[in-house]
Amino acid sequence: MKVRFDEIDAKLRYKLMTASIIPRPVALVTSLDKDGNANAAPYSFFNGMSEDPPLIVLGLKRRDSGPKKDTARNIEETSEFVVNIVNWEMHQGMLVTAADFPEGVDEIPLAGFTTATCDLVKPPRIAEAPVAFECRKFVTVQAGIDREIAIGEVVAMHVKDEIWDAERQYIDWQGNLPIARLWGTLYAQLGSPVDGPVPDLNDFK
Ligand SMILES: Cc1cc2nc3c(=O)[nH]c(=O)nc-3n(C[C@H](O)[C@H](O)[C@H](O)COP(=O)(O)O)c2cc1C
């Protein structure tokens, strides 16, 4: 079976891509509007793409009714955001932040989360998140009429003390790994990590 993407509509492309590009991590993005109102929402068109400069990428779709989502507008207006990594204790709260609340509503307390301050950017981070990345807008790419790709540069990172091994400079997830998004409303629990070293070329002689 082959599918030519110029022969199918965007909705079907989305369905096929999100069912195949799995699992995806979830960025719970916190940001501020230009009046200082906080906002939180999850984004799973998300990944890290570079470490020098350290870049994080988000795929931000417009609302079906046309305007930018609050996260996209806030990044455009204030150039700062925080990517909070989501674990299973945060799953239900994360879903609450995805609800279509009107502009200006702070989803963070509604989701049962509390905030902590950042060091280098103004938006708050989610105190419950095991890891949070403070980001500044690097560049935003307009992709089609209803998508923006926001690339953020990480300027600081927070890791919860209980999973931070300072001696080894290592994050020890202690089995409580972040959630993974599949397709639709499905999520997956990451199982036990499996070691997979790349073979040495000498092994092929
Ligand atoms: C797990 C999850 C992942 C999501 N990923 C995206 C995404 O990558 N891009 C997007 O535009 N919307 C995504 N959404 C939908 C937004 O979170 C939703 O539209 C939200 O209301 C936007 O909030 P905001 O206007 O406060 O930014 C996702 C929703 C969920 C539950």
Image (cartoon, rainbow, N blue to C red):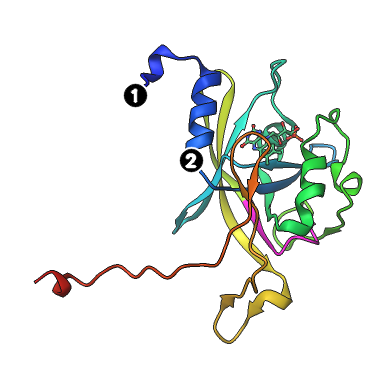
Q: What stretch is highlighted in magenta?
A: 125-135
Task: Say left or right for 65 vs 117.
Answer: left
Question: Magenta stretch: dominant SS?
Answer: strand
Looking at the rendering, which quadrant does residue 157 occupy?
Answer: bottom right
Looking at the rendering, which quadrant does residue 38 occupy?
Answer: top right
Specify whether residue 133 is painted magenta. yes
Specify whether residue 77 is painted magenta. no
Could one spot residue 126 in this view of the protein?
A: yes
Q: Nearer the viewer, residue 200 or 66?
A: 200
> Which residue, given by chain and number where applicable, does mark 2 sit on?
21
Given the image, on which type of amino acid does mark 2 rest?
A: Ile
> Which residue, given by chain and number where applicable, does mark 1 sit on?
1
Of the two numbered discs 2 and 1 on the same chain, state the one appearing first in sequence.
1
The location of residue 30, given as percent across then percent down, is 74, 47
- Which residue is pictured at 46% across the width and 68% down the height? 194
Q: Reply above or below: 65 against 140.
A: above
The location of residue 113, given as percent across then percent down, is 86, 54
